[in-house]
Image: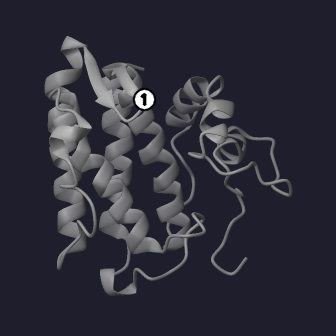
């Protein structure tokens, strides 16, 4: 699947979950990201999406500064989350075809690699949002395959850098979705009560 298609599908998946999530006043439920409730999780992804445009436009972290720190959801969290996703989709559609570099915290990176990171972000945090809010937890098999292939040789690096939690030792493996979630430090059977 073409990277622009993969990215668009992952963001549309995320947007669908945001739209179907309960009212934002109920966003205090826990998520598989043990330090985050639903609102914090959504704010994290919105921050990633707000960073997307300046980064694909060639700006540096120093250029942007702290513009995307703190609460980005405001009084209308769903609308702000959807607007951030749409802004990121437009920026990637405009910039990805030309290729080039983005300036990330660890140095310059190919835009294609950065977009693959964002696909994983939307897919895995989409699952986090789905299970935290009682939505359908089945992921798109094609997106699972794309992210699993990309992540297979990066897992140790992400884990040693603290970007991914340890693999849960009690989690069941055996199907592509469960294997991917375990690689990203998730228990595929997670529920708010567990």
Task: Say which quadrant the N terminus sits in.
Answer: top left
Q: Which residue is pictured at 31% across the width and 47% down the height?
A: 12
x and y, in percent, of residue 192 in the image: 63, 77
x and y, in percent, of residue 154 in the image: 61, 27
Residue identified by numbered label 1: 116
Q: Is residue 41 left or right of residue 94?
A: right
Q: Which residue is pictured at 17% across the width and 26% down the height?
A: 58
* Relative to 68, residue 24 above or below: below
Q: Is residue 65 left or right of residue 148?
A: left
Residue 62 occupies quadrant: top left
Of 61 and 83, the residue lying toward us: 61
Of 158 and 136, the residue lying toward us: 158
Q: Which residue is pictured at 37% across the width and 53% down the height?
A: 14
SS category of the residue bearing label 1: helix
Task: Say which quadrant the C terminus sits in.
Answer: bottom right
Q: How many circles with numbers are drawn on the protein?
A: 1
Q: Which residue is pictured at 68% across the width and 81% down the height?
A: 193
Given the current orientation, which residue lies at the most extreme front position?
Answer: 62
Given the current orientation, which residue lies at the most extreme bottom position?
Answer: 25
x and y, in percent, of residue 32 in the image: 60, 65
């Amino acid at each position: 699947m073409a990277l622009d298609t993969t990215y668009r599908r992952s963001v549309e998946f995320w947007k669908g979950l945001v739209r179907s999530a309960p009212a934002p006043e109920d966003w205090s439920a826990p998520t598989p990201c043990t330090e985050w409730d639903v609102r914090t999780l959504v704010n994290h992804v919105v921050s990633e999406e707000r960073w997307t445009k300046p980064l694909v436009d060639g700006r540096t972290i120093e250029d942007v500064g702290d513009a995307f720190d703190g609460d980005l959801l405001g009084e209308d969290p769903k609308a702000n989350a959807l607007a951030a996703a749409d802004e990121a989709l437009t920026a990637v559609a405009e910039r990805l075809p030309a290729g080039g570099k983005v300036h990330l915290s660890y140095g310059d990176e190919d835009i294609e690699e950065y977009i693959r990171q964002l696909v994983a972000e939307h897919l895995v945090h989409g699952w986090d949002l789905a299970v935290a809010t009682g939505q359908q937890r089945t992921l798109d098999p094609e997106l699972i395959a794309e992210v699993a292939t990309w992540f297979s040789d990066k897992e140790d690096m992400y884990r040693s850098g603290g970007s991914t939690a340890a693999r849960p030792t009690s989690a069941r493996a055996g199907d592509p979705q469960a294997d991917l979630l375990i690689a990203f430090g998730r228990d595929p059977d997670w529920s708010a009560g567990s």
